[in-house]
Amino acid sequence: MTYRKRISLVPILALLVLTASSVSAQDEDVIRVDSAIVRLNVGVVDREGRPAMALDRSSFRIFEDGVEQRILSFESVAAPFSVVLILDMSGSTLTFRDTIRSSAMRFIDALDPADRIAVVEFYDKINLLNDFTTRRDRVFNSIQVANGRGKTQLFKALDFSLDRLSREGNRRKAIIVLTDGVDTFARDQDRAAIERLKPLNPAEALRTENELMNRVLAKSDRQGVTIYPLALPTGDPAKLADPSPIQTALYSTARDRLGVLAQRTGGELAAINRLEEMGLLYAQVAANIRALYTIEYQSTNTRRDGKWRSVSIETKDSGLISKTRPGYFAR
């Protein structure tokens, strides 16, 4: 009763503020509901490794922590993607830019014409060379003019790209990133950890997951983005005459992080052992994207407790093998 009296006496301006607060609260509720919807990009192959391209919603069963979930939406392999192509233009790639450009163009040619593509370059800076478009001439021009030198801002480029993808609404989403994986800021943090702890084995001081990578994984979880790293052969201390234990530990940890990015998002890490392989690996990634189904479900576990939720998929045909991300943190 007291509350009603206060409302009747407040000025109109205060009522407007109260209304705005109510709308804001409603918006937050919508965000919480949306965050419970889990999106999975799913690849399916037969036992010979050939993609199964003609499945429908009834072909799949989804389980979270062993509990079957109801499929809310299903998109076939024909549904278009929004794709970010990220190019490492740091100093370590200076000597083979022409190979990068020709290989990236081959990748674009292998995508579906309806796919929307954005091109991002990174070095000391992160530049959006073109926003999402189906215009291949714009994309090819962006690849052609990509340039730079300096540091490797890998995780900032991924974070930036995920923010751009968030503007693409409910479209299917993927990131393809070409890099040697040695993020400059993460490497500096790793060096500091080794110096601070001074272990006999430098690798003991390093953790695969760090704050930068966890931020990227959280954003990709929320949007259902699949990340495909193409790992360049540059910077490998194994090619040096006498690499130090610290060099080996830093490089190994950086490469492990690329693997985690791929595995946690349902993608695949492609290691480029020879530069001549780059074009073929790009084309294989494009083929993988064109063979993905996308499935959404709303988890029956409504607790947003930050804990890990394990996800698995079954197909009705026992001769088929499905692959998607292994789960997510319920944040």
Image (spheres, rainbow, N blue to C red):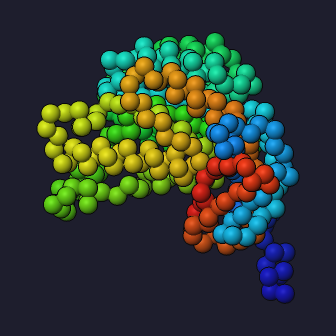
- In front of the other: 75 or 50: 50
Query: In the orientation shown, which residue stands out farthest toward the left?
Result: 242
- In front of the other: 277 or 193: 277
What's the residue at 19%, 33% (across, down)?
A: 240
- Indicate the quadrant containing the N terminus: top left, top right, bottom left or bottom right: bottom right
Q: Is residue 130 left or right of residue 76?
A: left
Instruction: Classify 242 as above or below 245.
Output: above
In the figure, residue 98 lies in which quadrant?
A: top left
Query: In the orientation shown, which residue stands out farthest toward the bottom?
Result: 1
Q: Horizontal and vertical percent for residue 16? A: 78, 60
Q: Is residue 284 left or right of residue 152?
A: right
What's the residue at 15%, 60% (across, down)?
A: 200
Residue 220 in view here: no
- Indicate the quadrant containing the C terminus: top left, top right, bottom left or bottom right: bottom right
Q: Horizontal and vertical percent for residue 141? A: 56, 13
- In front of the other: 242 or 223: 242
Q: Horizontal and vertical percent for residue 84? A: 58, 32
Q: Is residue 239 left or right of residue 289?
A: left
What's the residue at 16%, 44% (across, down)?
A: 244
What's the residue at 24%, 37% (across, down)?
A: 238
- In front of the other: 26 or 68: 68
Instruction: Classify 279 as above or below 194.
Output: above
Instruction: Classify 220 as above or below 34.
Output: above
Instruction: Classify 6 as above or below 201.
Output: below
Q: Horizontal and vertical percent for residue 79? A: 78, 35
